[in-house]
Image: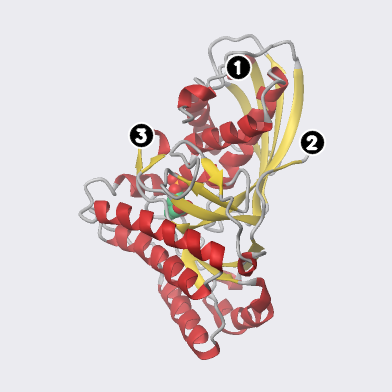
Amino acid sequence: MVSDKDFIQNEYNLQVENGSFQWSAPSNIALVKYWGKKEKQIPANPSISFTLNNCKTITKLSFAKKQNDGTFSFDLLFEGQPKEEFKPKIIKFFERIETYCPYLKDFHFTIDTENTFPHSSGIASSASGMAALAMNVMSLEKTLNPTISEEYFNQKASFLARLGSGSACRSIKGEIVVFGEHKDIAGSSDLFGVEFTSAVHPNFKNYQDTILLVDKGEKQVSSSVGHDLIFGHPFAEQRFAQAHRNLSTIKTVLENGDLEEFIKITESEALILHAMMMTSMPYFILMKPNTLEIINRIWKFRNETQIPVCFTLDAGANVHVLYPEMVKEDVLQFIKTELVGYCQNGQYICDEIGNGAVKYN
Ligand code: PMV
């Protein structure tokens, strides 16, 4: 079994003076949700997600050798402009990964980052952002130690991304990714995401995700605070057991293409996530009236047309509308005529399953 000690890099050569890399990493949307974590983003239960294709972060990391004076040194640019507000998050990330990447203080970095989705759209950029940064750090590591394998590269990138934001570890590689130990998923780990390697039914090929932007405001409760509230939560143990069962079921569904069962698990998981928030102490609600309007419209449309479209939710008010590629035209028409009115400024983003991080140079 892989342990965190396997990711400590002690063999590296600091002869390289400077250089740069650029990676993109996508966002992901969980089907079985990760909610509740122990220290250092160790998940309380396993989760599984579709990797997205269009919603991504593109990050360029430039590095130049410096005197190792015991400090992290970097400039941060967001869309080409200095962004001081993002710096504490990066410092925290560097602190968390330093044990595994002891070379970080030997370089000055320029981190130049941008998202393909609108800024503050309510789409979490932490998953794609941390994944893109982790891939760049691994490119640096490979420069310092060219012997590392591709498998180690990706596994450690996912491990590092997890230390930034738990769900980020599912944004590295593969169309469907499992995070957290589960008896039915060989090699699954609480330390990093693993690609779902079963043969996936053609129903799920190019599965579509149209993200309806219901509310772009700041979340009133961060997901970190939310994760912590699961401990001492009266339903926690039941929830963790249920996530294990749902992951077993969805594994079978992804193999056999049973869309009816897929819809049941996916929608139920979304509502459970929000039910856990509503029943924690303190309690909170992230859905908005329009979130519920949209859910009801989707249910009505599905009943009337038998088109297998369903929803899922993240820790926010936006709605992810999930459907097979073969019904794309009908669902997009439905979204344009019936759902756009519930979106803030009529905004929505068309996405679909993608394959993970991509190196630009
Ligand atoms: O990665 P975090 O700590 O922001 O957690 C996100 C958790 C959910 O998005 C609510 C669910 C999930 O599995 O992605």
- Please identify the residue farthest to the right as the structure is shown: 361
Badge 1 density bin: few <14, some 14–19, many ≥20, Cα 10 Å: some
Q: Which residue is mark 2?
A: 361
Residue at 54 percent across and 76 percent down: it is: 309
- Left or right for 277, reference 253: left
Residue 187, percent from left and from top: 50, 40
User: Which amino acid, by three-letter code, is at mark 3?
Assistant: Glu
Q: Position of residue 320 (x, y in %)?
A: 53, 66
How many neighbours does mark 3 have within 10 angstroms: few (below 14), some (14-19), or many (20 or more)? few
Label 1 to label 2: alpha-carbon separation: 21 Å
Q: What secondary structure is found at the residue carrying circle 1? A: loop
Q: Is residue 347 left or right of residue 313?
A: right
Q: Is residue 221 left or right of residue 156?
A: left
Q: Position of residue 182 (x, y in %)?
A: 42, 47
Q: Amino acid at mark 1?
A: Tyr
Q: Which residue is mark 1?
A: 103
Q: Earlier in the sequence, mark 2 or mark 3?
A: 3
Alpha carbons under labels 1 and 3: distance apart:
24 Å
Q: Say which element carries label 2.
A: loop
Identify which residue, 86 or 13, lies in the foreground. 13
Q: Earlier in the sequence, mark 1 or mark 2?
A: 1
